[in-house]
Amino acid sequence: MDAQIIELPKFLDRRGNLSIIEQFKQIPFKIARTYWIYDVPGGEKRGGHAYKENQEFIVALSGSFDVILDDGKERKVFHLNRSYYGLYVPKGVWRQMENFSTNSLALVLASTSYDAQDYVYDYNEFRKAK
Ligand code: TYD
């Protein structure tokens, strides 16, 4: 699976910590869009789809959650719980997010503008396309 955890630069000093993401440096795409997911009620799941073209980078800015990825060959669970690393999700990967902790904040950087046509919501269709 081409998905991977990417460590981000971390500047630590007595005033606190600072981390950064720059397009084409820490992540392999140009950032077209940013969104964030917050106030997720306990037990809720997000995602449950794939994108035909969109690539994403997901960071747990606060709290923790799991990202479950399935590329049609294997299924992997990534637990995100620190703001100095994130998960790179290539296009064409089925993804779901769950186990959000209270007050968790998921930052998502995306390679494309929002396009409802880019979503694949049918898992069987996703498997067939693989
Ligand atoms: P959705 O894709 O269902 O969220 P998730 O993948 O986390 O389950 O998005 C929820 C709503 O927000 C849906 O009505 C579409 C809208 N939306 C946008 O308008 N622009 C965006 O960039 C995103 C990600 C969602």
Image (cartoon, rainbow, N blue to C red):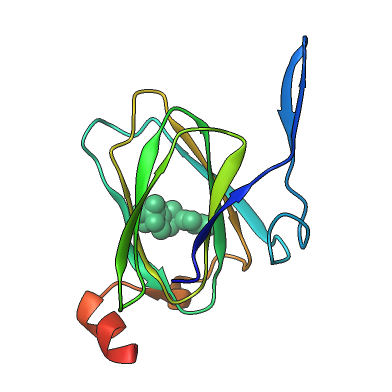
Residue 3 sits above or below residue 96 on the image: below
Q: Is residue 111 left or right of residue 106?
A: right
Residue toward you, 50 or 2: 2
Image quarter hosting the C terminus: bottom left
Q: Quadrant of the N terminus?
A: bottom left
Q: Above or below — where is 52 with respect to 40?
A: below
Kindly indicate the quadrant of the structure image that contains residue 80.
Answer: top left
The residue positioned 47% from the left and 79% from the top of the image is: 52
Q: Quadrant of ligand 1?
A: bottom left
Residue 40: give x, y in percent of width and height.
34, 34
Please identify the quarter of the rendering in which residue 17 is found. top right
How many numbered discs sit on the rendered protein?
0
Relative vertical location of residue 93 with respect to residue 87 in this rendering, above or below = below
Residue 94 x %, y %: 35, 68
* Residue 22 located left or right of residue 1: right
Q: Residue at the location (27% across, 31% down)?
A: 41
In this view, which residue lies farthest toward the top? 14
Q: Nearer the viewer, residue 28 or 41?
A: 28
Residue 49: image location, x then y, percent: 33, 66
Q: Is residue 63 left or right of residue 102?
A: right
Identity of the residue drawn at 54% across and 71% down: 54
Using the image, determine if residue 65 lies above or below residue 1: above
Residue 77 % position (x, y):
33, 53
